[in-house]
Image (tube, rainbow, N blue to C red):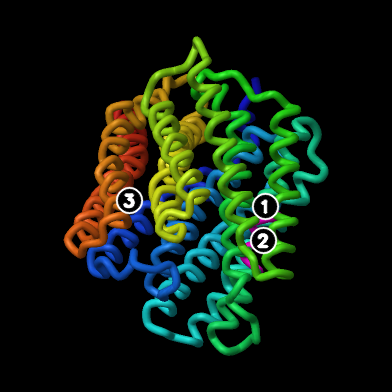
Amino acid sequence: MVKLAIDQSPASSLPRRFLLSAPPWGMAAGALLLFGGAPLLATRWQPATVALVHAFTLGVLGNTMFGSVLQFLPAAAGVRVRAATALGHALHGLFNAGAIVLLIALLTGWRTGLAFAGVLLPAAFLLLGAMTLPGMLVARGQRLLRTGIGLALLSAMLTALLGGGLALGLSGRLPMPAWPLVDVHAGWGILGWIVLLLASVARVVMPMFQGTSAPSATAQAGWTAAVVLALGAATWRALACADASWLRLALGLLVGAFAVAALWLQWRSPRARDGALLRSWRLGLLVLLLAALALLWGIRDGRLAGALGLAVALPLLLNGMSLEIVAFLGWIELHRRIGRGVQLPGVQRLLPEADKHRVLLMQLPPALLLPAAVLWPAAWLTRLAGLAMFAAWFACWLALTGVQRRSRRFARNLDTDR
């Protein structure tokens, strides 16, 4: 079992800044569906649909993953994040400014904005790599964990560079063909960055927070190697033959394998800790498996897989951990501020289990409505899905900010008693 090194954690404000930025992006995605209607789900190629996809991949998932990496590496992997205090604000501003400019440019046809986003977003990912990868190279122990996270970060930087090139191409500043680089960009982003990072971190968080056993080191190393090799071969096939079928096959099989393995570990564990986190992951993994199957079967040209995977499954998995991390950050902040000799409220008091279940329940309506709107296009159904999504992410934002409210109330009452 990996022990958490609390003293090695960065200032709580740094990862929390990213984690609290995710729910507003989810609300923005809901608003896009609410006002955009059925055309947003009719094709994957129109600019408003691309904006909706990136509201999830950058805004929701990206912010959550940036914040999680900055907290997880020092606390659980013994990796020092370089210049976290000096560069943390810049990293957050650069990443979210790039994402905002990209969405505005896609929605309005603003070519200069596309060029700006094509520079800002790769710069943010490269800065994250510069802050984390050097420490990973010199850290000791947990080689498999560090290898998986390091490969995920390298995939993220490659994804960002490809995306930046595509944005510059759309702006007219760089002659770059959109096809087949769009699918290569998506493949490395979803499988190489998001799912590989999730699978690597799951080796620690599933035993620690869900009571499961850890996957076999041999199996995890084999799966990780398969991800890199399959993406490499599929990229060659897409670029050389203009054929994305290998990419779809790699995503479907390897994402499905991760979902099945994690579900198997949950169900076979006699010590599984039943709670909101376990249920959020179980539901997220089931939906992720459905997304993998939908991609392999080619239902709705991959749009159903995108709705299930990017808008439902991956947010369920990452948001379940985000709730735990933010509560833990609140406890760390109180510990550092108040010191020894005072009994601090536990993590479960800072974010009660009832609040976590409320967030999970609020995520169920959009999880049903959005895939339904893809399968049976209708303006009213798409708008209803958007409204449900907005409400779900607003509930998540209330739960996350509630940790700070309870922490401040405890500190204020303690100062009054003194």
Which residue lies at the image location 50% right of the left edge and 27% below the top edge?
Answer: 263
Span of residues in magenta? 154-161
Q: Position of residue 259 (x, y in %)?
A: 53, 35
Numbered badge on residue 220: none
Q: Quadrant of residue 42?
A: bottom left
Amino acid type of disc 2?
Met
Residue where numbered disc 1 is placed: 153
Residue at the extreme front of the image, as rendered: 297
What is the three-letter code of the residue carrying label 1? Leu
SS category of the residue bearing label 1:
helix
> Which of the two marks, 1 or 3, is nearer to us in this view?
3
Earlier in the chain: of badge 2 and badge 3, it is 2
The residue wearing badge 3 is 371
Q: CA distance from mark 1 to mark 2?
A: 6 Å
| Left or right, 168 with reference to 374 | right
- Are discs 1 and 2 less than 8 Å apart at CB? yes
Left or right: 262, with 101 as reference point: right
Q: Which residue is mark 2?
A: 157
Q: For the C terminus, which image quadrant?
A: top left
**Residue 158, percent from left and from top:** 68, 62
Total tally of numbered discs in the picture: 3
User: What whole-number distance in Å separates the C-alpha atoms at marks 2 and 3?
Assistant: 30 Å
* Residue 337 in view here: no
Mark 3: give few (<14), some (14-19) or many (20+) Cα within 10 Å.
Answer: many
- Position in image of residue 254 (x %, y %): 61, 42
Q: 267 or 329: which is nearer to us?
A: 267
The answer to which of 131 and 409 lies nearer the viewer is: 131
> Whole-percent x and y of residue 395?
27, 45
Quadrant for the N terminus in the image: top right
Packing grade of label 1 (10 A; few <14, some 14-19, many >=20) is many
Which of discs 2 and 3 lies nearer the camera? The answer is 3
At 74% across and 51% down in the image, what residue appears?
Answer: 133
